[in-house]
Image: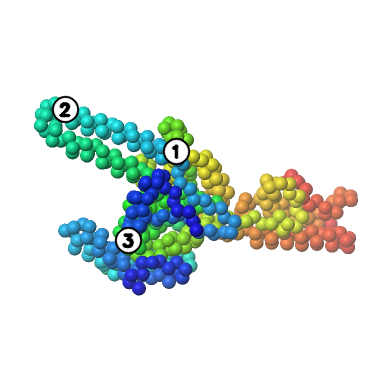
Amino acid sequence: MKPKIEAASQWCYQGIWGVLTRYFRVPDQPPTLPPTAEDEQIQSFKPAYGFLNYLRLQFWVACILIDLGILIGWVIILVNSPWIGVALALPALFLAVVPDVIAYIAIHLRFDTTWYVVSDRSLRIRRGIWVIHETTITFDNVQNVSISQGPLQRYFGIADVLVETAGGGDKRAQQQAGHAMGAHLGLIQGIANATEIRSQLMARVGESLTSGLGDEDDLGRTRHSGWTDEQVTVLREIRDLVVAAGGLRDGTGSRQQP
Amino acid sequence: MTESNQADDSKFDPLAITRPEPVLLKYYAAVAFLTGPGFPVAFLPLYFKYVTLAYKFDEDGVSMRWGILFRREVHLTYRRIQDIHLTRNLIQRWMGLATVGIQTASGSSGPEMSIEGIPQAEALRDFLYSKMRGARGLKPLPAAGSSSGSQPQQGDGAGREADADEPLQLLREIRDALRSNAMPPPAGQSGSAAGGETTS
């Protein structure tokens, strides 16, 4: 029915991904939103491929720096006391290689398990491998939308969109800690069409009559005037009555003089 | 009943939920077990929470209460929900559970209500989402034909303007009609001032 999540790389999908979905119950289907209207457009998408490259570059920089540190430390030990140095050769190699492999796989898994669903009225974000976290926000509740893009992200053509709803909590700290979930916040990380998403959200926020604070919005108000449909109907009736009465008087010619 | 991990979403009725499923106790036991020697200390409050935990879903809102010595009750309405979080850690996924966190626009960064122990957590989350403000979209604009010949509408923007100004337009027409009823207009005009942009 739905296509399975397209893995970033084949080996990752077949091996570790298979174990994760089978034994660790990682969902292998993209998240979706329940349709609330017939004509609702719902699209699920992953971060842009540039996001994976961005993570990879970060990985390689960190990898080279750490491994260089390990190598230098090992060489110093080897020069000072050759026997200990030789004995430590294998553990040092282990220490240098194994975390890198794990980190590299984790990057792919992070890319593969991050999903965004956007409809024309709400937003859902899924993130995480061990703890899978899904956030749902309707655009009506959005207070502000911000886009951030660093120079590296600009090089890879991606940006982060931060969607905030009303309420407190240390949002910035959470965002910097990298798990921007939990507080009144949705983080759409590493997408290529950030401005498109932002204008879609802001258009929807601008149309909303309420302040996005959980006020009732289904009182039947028309979108701009603040009058309810019933009030306008009564006004129309009064207008018609008054006009009809005026026409009647004009016809009979019995107008009162002031 | 006890091992109903497979969520049967087809006949899921959120309004019928009153108690968490018994598998929640197993989850609490597993969580307490992870603390190692702290198991009794960690498990006791969780056990009492499980025993006393009660949910009540109705048409407008949801409430939950728990506690034996210190009792807590949380009430909130669906309309005031700001964001919904569905969190599943590894143990919860193995047991078919999830935590549905509901946030309102309050100052705390944690969820105001965490609904645990519902196997049909995704269906519950989607139920809450459908009750949330803005999930069903804005009210559609009233049809242009319903305003009985008040204004010609040129294009979309003009149509919206007309909608915004329709009460004002109607009030002006009433005023003009009343004025023309009350005082005779200068020769020839008989109550045809409808729609006139009279400066007040």
Q: Which residue is mark 2?
A: A76
Q: Closer to the observer: label 2 or label 3?
A: 2
At a point 78% along the width and 48% down the height, the residue shown is B196
Q: Residues within 10 Å of mark 2 (few under 14, many from 20)?
A: few
- Give the residue type that dot 3 points to: Trp
The answer to whether A155 appears left or right of A64 in the picture is right
Q: CA distance from mark 2 to mark 3?
A: 48 Å
Q: Which residue is mark 3?
A: B94
Callouts 1 and 3 on one subunit:
no
Q: CA distance from mark 2 to mark 1?
A: 39 Å
- Residue A128 percent coordinates (x, y): 36, 50
Relative height, residue B95 to residue A55 (above, below): below
Give the total of numbered labels: 3
Q: Which residue is mark 1?
A: A50
- Residue A207 percent coordinates (x, y): 58, 49
- Give the residue type that dot 2 points to: Ile
At a point 35% along the width and 57% down the height, the residue shown is A22
Q: Residues within 10 Å of mark 1 (few under 14, many from 20)?
A: some
- Give the residue type that dot 1 points to: Gly
Residue B150 can be seen in this image: yes
The answer to whether B142 appears left or right of B126 in the picture is right
- Residue A178 percent coordinates (x, y): 36, 43
> Which quadrant of the figure has residue B94?
bottom left
Q: Nearer the viewer, residue A212 or B12?
A: B12
Task: Looking at the image, tell me whether mark 2 or mark 1 is earlier in sequence order.
Answer: 1
The answer to whether A98 appears left or right of A12 in the picture is left
- Residue B107 percent coordinates (x, y): 38, 51
> Which quadrant of the figure has residue A51?
top left
Q: CA distance from mark 1 to mark 3?
A: 33 Å
Q: Residues within 10 Å of mark 3 (few under 14, many from 20)?
A: some
Q: Nearer the viewer, residue B169 or A129?
A: A129
Callouts 2 and 1 on one subunit:
yes
